[in-house]
Amino acid sequence: MGSPPIRALERCVRLLALSLLLAGALAKAAEPVEEILVTGDASVVERQHGVAAVSVVDEEVLELVRQNHIYEIMVRVPGVWISRGSGQEHLTAIRSPVLTGAGACGEFLFLENSVPIRPVGFCNVNNLFELNTEQAAALEVLRGPGGALFGGNAVHGVINAVTHLDHAPWRISVEGGSYEYGQVRLSGAQESDLGRVVLDAHATHTDGYRHDTGYDQQKLNLGLIGPIAGWQVHTLVSATNLDQDTGGFVPGFQAYKDGQLRKTNPNPEAFRDAWAVRLTSEWSKALSEDRELVLTPYVRRSKMKFLQHFLPGQPLEKNDQTSAGLIGTLSGANGALDWRAGGHLEWADGGLSQFQDGPTEGSAFLQETRPAGLHYDYEVRSLMAAAFYDLDWGITPTLALVHGLRLEWLNYDYENHGLVGNTRDDGTECGFGGCLYTRPADREDDFTNVAGRLGLEWTATEGMTLYAQLGSGFRPPQATELYRLQSGQNVADLDSERAWSIELGARRNGSALDLELTLFAERSDDVILRDAEGFNISDGKTESYGTEFSVAWAVSEAHSFDLAGTYARHQYAFDRDAARGERIEDGNDVDTAPRWIGSAHWRYEIRPQLVSELEWVYLDDYYLNAANTASYDGHQVVNWRATWQINARLRTFARVLNVFDRKYADRADFAFGSYRYFPAMPRQVYLGFEYSYQENP
């Protein structure tokens, strides 16, 4: 990594140090502030009215886990697997297989205080590293289609990071660990003349386990909360920066088991530089005793460049997005009916370029069809407008009906800045039928979609509820699927993907035992994929069914057990020859879709100030290709964490990940006739301290 990333890290550390000094000065004069609960509009859970499969990871768990990667926290959520890549990279699965290639992006919606972090149509499969999940007040996960409430991209699920509205007291933490890992965190809140200022910030560095796989990362949430002219206003600035040396797949059957090979990085030249900034401001006002208006304008900007080390020729991609929008909702109650209606407007301007420095190595075909020079250079402007409503009708004191609907329109205006067609950037033709990369002519595309939900919730007894729900979701084709074409395809005539689901659920909340069980079935149509000719098409179909469960048992005041698990089948429901020589057959398992995933946690409160937790994580075997001829054996991992409040101001914490030093793969794949893996890290040890400027209660 070059000197600019190091200087950036140094500047961040200096900023944290300065903030620490300021926090100390402010804390001396500050009075403790009253805790504020999460507002309904910031929370995904509040919008479900109990009729959905929703999990919440609270702040206490986030503080104990102190994740290096989002995968580490999401193992606690049934139905979810975040497949870890190199550094902070990842692929998401929520009630779905881990999706890769064409059609993989845009299947999940990532939110911050219920506001999407990216514009519709401009997804990034690694989007979760743009959220400060490490310091969230809570992480909420909606499993299953969420289109009726949240619109495009909420096909299989939603992840929402809820930020803090308050902190007490100011605190700083320093942590170090294996492979030169280091992190500094600062958080606190302070009353001012403008309102309450809330800060969460951290900076992280690691050299990485594999060669040339270190990264520097900084994240910031800065909020201001207070009244303005009769409105309650919550303004939030969020920023993230990632400078990463990226590791490629390690090739070879079960290469992750080889003690030396698993440390290697076949692509030491690979990197990813990315940053994102968002400004949101939620304005809420009570119009009457039973009417509330909420307006949330927002502005976003993100930029990224990375070397596509996984492609022959290793072209460099640069992309950026600028967007702004407004979400408005009016909510109220009329007797037994609670209702919510509103609209969403969004404008975006995004660009993408791909450039290859030198000639491609390999066969004559690869060298001729993947030339050096400019491959893509385009800009897409988009407009989105949506209207929605959601109803919760208490039919009887124990029976409620929930219904919601969303209508969404999206327009793309695409402008090509390069030569039209699949020539080289100087206009000369490639051999073997033309260059791989194809630049379509300027065009406009429109997509209109509708999603709905209908559900019932029955309170059978005190503490026991049952629910049933029909739901749907959609995602319009992403800009890259429409305009980043290959193999001479001049127009991608794509439809929006649509998903329908039915689920039945039961919840029991008791004084010592909480249980939740969900049964679901889901079908997706018009799934986007790349066919054997290299064309983007939208005629794929998949079917899924399964069960998700969670158990939380407080055995005694000192001991508690948590269990989360999923059994699911994800199958192709069509036949087709696909890209890379794959043959998709109806009834085969979708690749990278383990049938069983789960975790268990034993928490032991040795004393009120000292807590230990032992974690077991299980991942079943899974197929690596559409033909179901290659597979990965799965794995089991044990982790340990502890925290000790030494006194009213000082706390220490420790973690041992992969306690038994198992050799396994974070991600396995089979491509171009060979196995390849992202090897998991061996045993790691971390130790840290946290100092609070005011005494903890």
Image: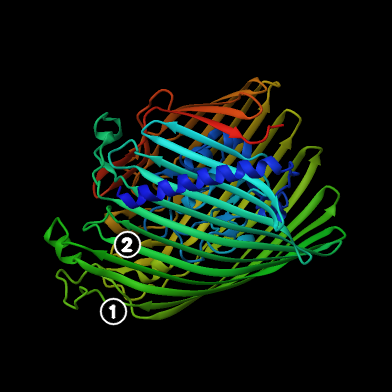
Q: Position of residue 610 (x, y in %)?
A: 62, 22
Can residue 348 be seen at all in this image of the molecule?
yes
Q: Residue 317: which disc?
A: 2
Sooner in the amino-acid sequence: mark 1 or mark 2: 2
Can residue 148 be seen at all in this image of the molecule?
no
Q: Position of residue 427 (x, y in %)?
A: 19, 78
Specify the amino acid type for callout 2.
Glu
Q: Residue furthest top?
A: 606
Question: Relative to the observer, which residue lies in front, 346 or 517?
Answer: 346
Q: Position of residue 482 (x, y in %)?
A: 39, 70
Question: Relative to the observer, which residue lies in front, 490 or 501?
Answer: 490
Which element carries disc 1, helix, strand or loop?
loop
Question: Relative to the observer, which residue lies in front, 412 or 307?
Answer: 307
Q: Is residue 280 above or below residue 213?
A: below
Which element carries disc 2, helix, strand or loop?
strand
Specify the amino acid type for callout 1.
Val
**Is residue 439 rendered to the left or right of residue 612?**
left
The residue under the point 59% across, 43% down is 187
The residue under the point 49% across, 43% down is 70
The residue under the point 61% across, 23% down is 646
Q: Residue 420: which disc?
A: 1
Q: Residue 604: which disc?
A: none
- Distance from the alpha carbon under mark 1 to that under mark 2: 19 Å
* Quadrant housing the C terminus: top right
Q: Find residue 422 and report its image quarter.
A: bottom left
Q: Position of residue 581 (x, y in %)?
A: 27, 55
**Is residue 659 rendered to the left or right of residue 668?**
right
**Is residue 640 rendered to the left or right of residue 414?**
right
Q: Find residue 302 and report its image quarter.
A: bottom left
Crowd rating for badge 1 (residues with CA inside 10 Å; few <14, some 14–19, many 20+): some
Q: How many marks?
A: 2
